[in-house]
Amino acid sequence: MKTAKFFELAKLHGLESCEVVISKDTSIDMNVYQAEVENYSIADSRVIYARGILNGKMGFAVSEKDDAKTPEYLVKQIIISASNSESDDVAIIFKGSEKYKKRNMFNKKITALSEEAKLQNLFIIEKKLKAYDSRISDVDAASYSESESQLELYNSFGLKLKESDNHFYYYASVVIKEGEEVKTGYKVALFNDPDALDIDLFVKQVAEDGLSKLGGKPCKSGKYPTLINPKVTSSLLAAYLGSANAERVQKKSSLFIDKLGTKVASSKITVLDAPLTKNIFYTYFDGEGVAKFNKPVIEKGVLKTFFHNLSTAAKAGVSTTANGSNSGGKIGISISNIVLKPGRKSSEELMKDIKEGFYLTEVQGLHSGLNPTSGDFSLQASGFMIRDGKFAEPVNLVTIAGNLQKLFLDVKAVANENELQLSSYTTSSILVKKLAVSGE
Amino acid sequence: MITKKVAVQVLNAALATGGDFAEIFLEETYSNNLNVDSGKTQPPSSAVSYGAGVRILKKLQSVYGYTNDLSLKGLVKLATQLSASFSGAQEIFVTEIEKVKFNNKHKVSTPLSSVETKKKIDLLKKGDAVMREFDTRIVRTIAVLIMSDRNIEIFNSDGKHFQDSQERVRFVLQAIAMQPGAFETGFTGPGAHAGFDFVEGLDIEQEARDVADLAVRKLSAKDCPSGVMPVVIGNGFGGVIFHEACGHPLEASAVSKGLSPFAGKLGQKVAHESVTAIDDGTIPNAWGSNNIDDEGVATQHNVLIKDGVLQNYLIDRFNGRRMNRESTGAGRRESYKYETTSRMSNTYIAAGKHSKDEVIGSVKLGLYAKKLGGGSVNPTTGDFNFAADEAYIIRNGKVCELVKGATLIGNGAEILTKIDMIANDLERAQGMCGAASGSIPTDVGQPTLRVSAITVGGQGGKLK
């Protein structure tokens, strides 16, 4: 779309200021099953997000259609949107930050690699998984996915920002059968450097994820000292930090109302919002065009800031934290690239003094079994028992129940893994004093 | 969206390297949402989803691609790129395309677009006001009207052309209640494959009162006890248990590779004899219904389990190849950005003989999960979890105190054998189901029923 045409029409129809974001994505996906390419897909798509202010109210519209009529359609929809709005959000189109910390995260090595080479890796992964253990009855997926995205932001103040990145991941999933018992194991390995893939390590992780679950049964119900692995820690932390979303605080549906500057977690917990970290989740401007920056969110258990966009910040009389995000055209708040500051000890060391405890490795049902407002949760879980300081029998089909605030206040120690998760969080295992596990 | 002539060229480009089937799926969907948040209308949102997906099959291989460029050049480029995955000479040539006609079972008397925005907002405000005024402890209320007009066209190498328009509407009410130390929510979200007439038929004030009432009552509810116990699951959204635990493992995507616990069990007893389960995509105006699926196959009334015996699966064209079975009209996708796979439509457990009171009355000490929330399942192992939105303790056959924070967990194949008493009050409820081909509207449903034993998780200690 010609943005000039849109800005011209917007002005003509009385929009005070406006913005266009054009997002373009391409991707390639391939999946190998039983030594053949089972699925191959390619995608090429674009979305136009447009916003504008009319009589002090923000309106917005989204279109994947891009033809001669698109600018007019978008302006018309923005007017409908703004003129029906009674929102007390502060309508702001951003003039621009003084400085942007732009870094090139696009890796040409990914596109340079031939499709044959990528496919070959999948064939090898599938073959090695089948040979890994006789109890692996099927490799139901060995797939590769690569994507490239480009984001452009233009507004009527002349702000122009552009960012492009690319990354890829390998995913494999196995079915393990022993007698009547069936388990699944999987792993996603996400990178933006082709040299980072270690096939043997990946194969081992996929296979062991499934094999280690064999023989899993519910454990005895009780309150156990619990070590939570980095993956589950990241899921629980994400749910907890949702309470620091300023929009939720201002709309009174958050645990963190009036909690700024107070203790919301154990003093072992320090959390940083680190969007400028050099990893594949790096991003240098937010959904409103504000320059991103790193900052502490929880320092030694004390809540230091909420996550703001321009509107919530204006209402609270503070500066935006550059967490504005464009969600279907509307500006919300997003939280990504969070770092939980690691401790000094390894999780094995933390486990040493536990006579009987639980090692939590997986939770299910976060979207339904967790009340994001109160922090109460009751979730399907699995993991291992800890006996005399060591991993013992696998545990499956139990529930863990508690409250996020209590859980994070209850953290005795943070381990030192410092692992980047698919969720963009970098986390380590945490040890909590007691967690209610319900099984037999 | 494209002419037959363009379709023929694109299909032939797709088949040029020996593919045995090719399909073009075109979509133009207009979505509009209205949202009233604590009495204030938020800026209405609108979105146009527009694009085409091209698919080529060759035996058990499938290639898929999509683009927003619907020009002849754009589509031929995509088809050619995809066909490069195969090497061979063209075997199937498309010369003519014929439009397939069918009756529209989902009549719309008042199209959503014919009703002015203000009238719609007024309805939302009515619901919102009832919730807000219900109790001083209600701190936030949300009323949303979700509307979509999905226009699809399918051209395939069988020389067929299908066209359908699917209008859907959903009316969502949510209330959040707060008192020191507690937050609770109430929710309802009725929807249909219909127009504004559906919304006008709702008793919005009653729905709003129920939502607010539940949120407030939950504030003083005790934590749900945990342990293995008999559970009576309420009708309507309680059907999510069958959806997650049994519906997903009956999808051909899992069955065709032998990954499902139900694979190879046709004709065998998989459930208690009182269980009959159906997936019916033909129910007029139901949320999960369509005239045709996203591969152009007519939807069906598909009996999955009859009197405990497995009768059929949910099958799409591609997975059907591996199973040597025809599609059951279950090929669905969120949009052109997804390749179709086997999915549910309106899936429910059929009504039984007992009254609801008889089912509840049969339990000495257990849980009545009147309303279930969401859940998830691992389709290979069948392990599932659901949250209960509204649950009570049953003592001596009587419904007693309300409890909060209950989660039910178990295994699908196992629970089917434990559903042992079914009432006659079948109801369906609406949801969005997420899987490989995206998020799609589906109905779940069931009568009130008893599960003899299931693991309940909660913070309330042992049930006494």
Image (spheres, rainbow, N blue to C red):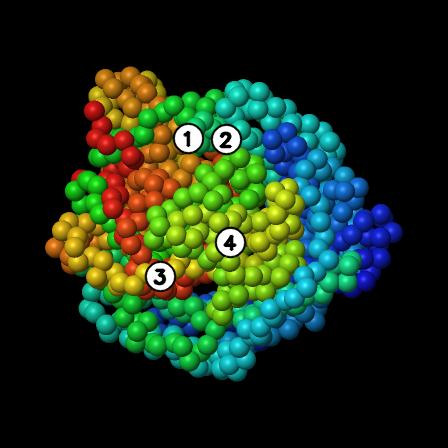
Q: Give the CA separation, mark 2 to mark 1.
A: 10 Å
- Tag 2 and tag 3 share a subunit: no
Q: Give the CA separation, mark 4 to mark 1.
A: 25 Å
Q: Which numbered disc covers residue B176?
A: 2
> Within the image, what quadrant is residue A157 found in?
bottom right
Relative to residue B91, is residue B364 depicted above or below? above
Q: Give the CA separation, mark 3 to mark 1.
A: 32 Å
| Residue that mark 3 sits on | A342
- Tag 3 and tag 1 share a subunit: no
Relative to residue B95, is residue A363 depicted above or below? above
- Label 2's element? strand
Which chain's residue wears label 4?
Answer: A
Q: Is residue A312 left or right of residue A420?
A: right
Mark closer to the observer (2, 4): 4
Q: Give the CA separation, mark 3 to mark 4.
A: 19 Å
- Tag 4 and tag 1 share a subunit: no
Residue drawn at x 45%, y 38% as measured from the top left: A255
Relative to residue A103, is residue A388 depicted above or below? above
Q: Earlier in the sequence, mark 2 or mark 1?
A: 2
Residue drawn at x 78%, y 52% as measured from the top left: A17
- Label 3's element? loop
Residue drawn at x 21%, y 24% as measured from the top left: B464
| Residue that mark 4 sits on | A335
| Residue that mark 1 sits on | B182
Which chain's residue wears label 3?
Answer: A
Mark closer to the observer (3, 4): 3
